[in-house]
Amino acid sequence: MELRDVPPVTRLLRSYLSQFVVAPDFDEYDVRHWLLPTENIVDSYVVESPESQEITDFCSFYTLPSSILGNQNYSTLKAAYSYYNVSTQTPLLQLMNDALIVAKRKDFDVFNALDIMHNESFLKELKFGPGDGQLHYYLYNYRMNRALKPSELGLVLL
């Protein structure tokens, strides 16, 4: 993804996120700030139609390294976390498989994804293992009249 891709990615993302009960409302500034690739922070990629040169799909992941204590061989675990992904032409399974390949080539040790948005559609097929805990979102000063299903949540908290 490059700076010139910000407007079409913003349109894709806004359209995609509008289907969820809770989701951010990104504008171009937000997309530039949160999703434009920054070394060791966020990686973002676009798929461009060969015919129209329009951006049809988008995927991203962020970096969260963890210190490894008490190991003489390794000091850091380089983890990638699935961030925002929009699939309109490329199947999400293929898009995420490509993201896994890119992360491996960039020397990530592990790739994590939450079961929110449409992520459930690729987790099993791409052999993601279930986590060992539950993630609870606390949205300060928000009032919800019921608990959300993961598929209704379009928000990734950092």
Image (cartoon, rainbow, N blue to C red):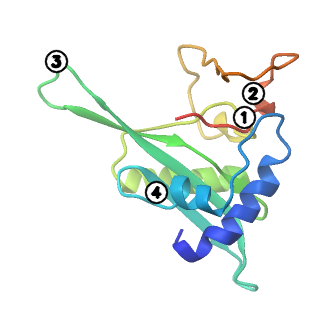
Q: CA distance from mark 1 to mark 3?
A: 35 Å
Q: CA distance from mark 4 to mark 1?
A: 21 Å
In the displayed orientation, state which residue is furthest to the top. 133
In the displayed orientation, state which residue is furthest to the front. 141
Earlier sequence position, callout 3 versus callout 4 = 3
Q: What residue did someone put label 1 on?
A: 120
Earlier sequence position, callout 2 versus callout 1 = 1
Q: What residue did someone put label 2 on?
A: 150
Q: Residues within 10 Å of mark 2 (few under 14, many from 20)?
A: some
Q: What residue did someone put label 4 on?
A: 102
In the displayed orientation, state which residue is furthest to the bottom. 51
Query: Which x, y percent locates residue 5?
Result: 61, 72
Label 2 sits on a secondary structure element that is: helix
Q: What residue did someone put label 3 on?
A: 70
Give, as a three-letter code, the residue at label 1: Glu
CB-based contact (under 8 Å), mark 1 and mark 3: no
At a point 63% along the width and 17% down the height, the residue shown is 136
Q: CA distance from mark 3 to mark 4?
A: 29 Å
CB-based contact (under 8 Å), mark 4 and mark 2: no
Give, as a three-letter code, the residue at label 3: Gly
Q: CA distance from mark 4 to mark 2?
A: 26 Å
CB-based contact (under 8 Å), mark 2 and mark 1: yes
Q: CA distance from mark 2 to mark 1?
A: 9 Å
Residue 69 shows up from this direction: yes
Q: Residues within 10 Å of mark 3 (few under 14, many from 20)?
A: few
Q: Is residue 23 above or below residue 39?
A: above
Label 4 sits on a secondary structure element that is: helix
Give, as a three-letter code, the residue at label 2: Pro
Earlier sequence position, callout 4 versus callout 1 = 4
Give, as a three-letter code, the residue at label 4: Val
**Rendered image quadrant of residue 23:** top right
